[in-house]
Image (cartoon, coloured by chain):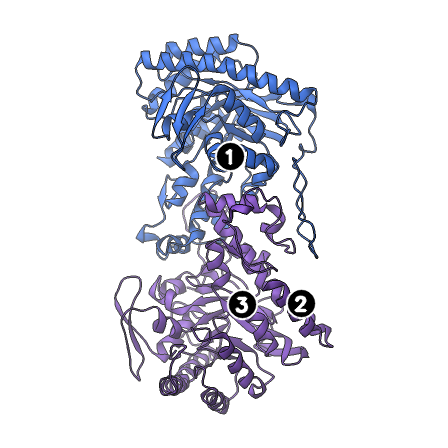
Chain colours: A blue, B purple
Amino acid sequence: MPGYSRPEGRARRIAVLKDNIPPSPGFSPGLMFEFRIHSTSGAARTGSLTLPHGTVETPVFMPVGTQGTVRALSPADLRAVGAGIVLANTYHLHVRPGEDVIAQLGGLHRFMAWDRPLLTDSGGFQVFSLAGFRRVDEEGVEFQSHVDGGRRVLTPERATEIQWTLGADIAMAFDHVAPGAADEATSRDALERTLRWLERCVKRHGELLDRWTVGESVQPSNRPTVPQTLWPILQGGTHRALRQEGLRRILDMGSWTGLAIGGLSVGEPKPKMYEVLETLGPRLPAPIPRYLMGVGFPEDLVAAVERGVDLFDCVAPTRNGRNGSAFTPEGPLNIRNAALRTDAGPLDPTCDCETCTTYSRGYLRHLFVADELLGLRLLSLHNVRYLIRLAEQMRAAIRKGNGALAAWADDWRRRYT
Amino acid sequence: MPGYSRPEGRARRIAVLKDNIPPSPGFSPGLMFEFRIHSTSGAARTGSLTLPHGTVETPVFMPVGTQGTVRALSPADLRAVGAGIVLANTYHLHVRPGEDVIAQLGGLHRFMAWDRPLLTDSGGFQVFSLAGFRRVDEEGVEFQSHVDGGRRVLTPERATEIQWTLGADIAMAFDHVAPGAADEATSRDALERTLRWLERCVKRHGELLDRWTVGESVQPSNRPTVPQTLWPILQGGTHRALRQEGLRRILDMGSWTGLAIGGLSVGEPKPKMYEVLETLGPRLPAPIPRYLMGVGFPEDLVAAVERGVDLFDCVAPTRNGRNGSAFTPEGPLNIRNAALRTDAGPLDPTCDCETCTTYSRGYLRHLFVADELLGLRLLSLHNVRYLIRLAEQMRAAIRKGNGALAAWADDWRRRYT
């Protein structure tokens, strides 16, 4: 039952919900998951990634809708700030409300009323960072739900099946994430397991895809109307040799529609992260998009785009927004600052979002000081818009060519820091 | 400095905030505060009330923006659900951020980015219900701020001046509110004091208006660009004789552009409230709008419109919404109910709001169970829309005539309870 059925037996039914969220109008199976590079500037590039629910212009920032909602924002808000793709978390949605509930409610797109592309993380990062108890073995990870404390198991096969049931455009392979400061032996261990698990994810995903292709109902309750792709995650910590080896072995496994770099921005020093990106850069196959997982502070976005990254996600804009911290061209601004009490100016005078074009800093400060919910939303909205605009600005600079990106980035850093 | 100045010395300034919120395009001083009755049905009537910031169709429900924001909703949300006028609380805004701050930020309309009519309550109800410590004497009320515990004083003159500084379209007289179960002597005392305070409010309001009329700057920081009217509040508890006497003495004081009935819905049994309305009904002058303060449960709205009331306000739709309780034609619905887990239908199938036309009950339940902020907003939005539609439906029934309102109300009650 993929659709959205309306209750029977009631008069004056005027709320009409779409039966399903179909592929976007321009969708053509032939172009599916195609990535076209439009222009480059050093290692940086602009491109467009065609997915079942729409085409995404890269570099792009993906807002995070952990529990099937980008915290404090509605889908209309996300469209208004120009979000092209949103990330949701398999771990959280599996634990609550469960993928079967989401399937019965029409799949993840219909569930969260988001008709543009979606990407689901595999749950690997969450079981290694959130769960209290966990036991890792070759089969998978047994962990304790953060919601009800119950024991659950995620394996590469289960993570793949859950994501297929959710029905995002892009699913991620189930990975073993080591801490940022892990030594080489620990990182090697996580890398090797991630590679073995990747093979199992690919196998299970291929089986689901084969059965979908011949029209077989893979999940009785939710056969997606459009297919899904699977991206691998490269681990290896901050160890350059491991990263290189891992990348080579992933590429040797076959062709991919995209590739994610995991295990960064997990506590290691920033120069280490940039070093890994620089090591990988020339070795990454140009024709597929590169997704740097969990990265989303403005300075990291700029540095990573310069090093050839195409996609990003991070909770920073919404989490910081809810804490009263706003991204501005001059760096973060604490909206609770008493100096803003009678500041009649906009939060960020260069920004075109609803928050900056409608309200004064003094009013936004009042909302936070008075604990008003609208404040959480307005700063989250601005911060997400800020990162989306940052990506837009970098795309424009890359397209311009002739070192425009480097000049733009220098200017940006000079103001921001 | 009534305007909204933009900060100097920054490049690429694209956030442009309007310098002020002017009167509505159709505003004509000659029609100001005029109330036109269009049709009647028994004691009920439809009308339109012309205010400096727009014309309000009555009967009308006013959402409550206690601290200068209707909790969890933005001005755009309020426009989308058809809100024509919003109420804000003088007590809360005086205590935080203070009327001088609001004046420096351009007045209340500009502060909260609401360009339609506003009404401010005088603070009387709050100092008698919220403040911990309070000392009442003939001069006014000394109370303890619920924010910082500091001692403050509100008098009829101060309440009038603060409201003038805030600049809402309608200001309320400062009143002495007795508890719902107050005996006749206590209610008499509150009524007498309210009448004496009303004279002082009228005097102070007249002085402010006179100085405004000759172009004098009444508040150096915030001379309103349009004038304001003052409405009296009738007290008298549930004592019919006191209510009648109070009404007569208020009407004897002069002509009014509107009249509020206070001290109801404060703990007395509902039949008592209806009895007071029925007592007052035939005695209220037809040509001016009647505002029943603090009333906003659906059944009360219907009963009061049938008894001739034109305006309402209440925090119920937003407070209940944040608690997960939704108004529906079949009565309140608890969105956390486990039976809604896989309910793919809309919250209220008869409703046209964003919540009901976009999301399933199952998703809304998930948002509440998962403590997601979007849930608070979506149920608040629906509940406010529900009450605004209720008023719209009653206006349509009254216009239809021939007992259509009674038939509509019978049908409505049969379904709701």
Q: Name the residue at 54% across, 85% down.
A: B280
Secondary element under disc 1, as helix, strand or loop, is loop
Do marks 2 and 1 share a subunit?
Answer: no
Residue, disc 1: A98
Q: Name the residue at 49% across, 87% down.
A: B247
| Nearer to me, B281 or B50 | B281
Question: Which chain does the numbered disc 1 sit on?
Answer: A
Q: Amino acid at mark 3?
A: Pro
Do marks 3 and 1 share a subunit?
Answer: no
Query: Mark number for residue B311?
Result: none
* Cβ–Cβ under 8 Å for marks 2 and 1: no
Instruction: Give the number of the mark in front: 3 or 1.
Output: 1
- Please state, as top left, top right, bottom left or bottom right, where the N terminus of chain B lies in the image: bottom left
Do marks 3 and 2 share a subunit?
Answer: yes
User: Which mark is first along the chain, 2 or 3?
Assistant: 3
Question: Which chain does the numbered disc 3 sit on?
Answer: B
Q: Name the residue at 60% across, 59% down.
A: B330
| Nearer to me, B370 or A272 | B370
Residue, disc 3: B117
In x, y percent, where is residue A37?
Answer: 58, 21
Query: Mark number for residue B411?
Result: 2
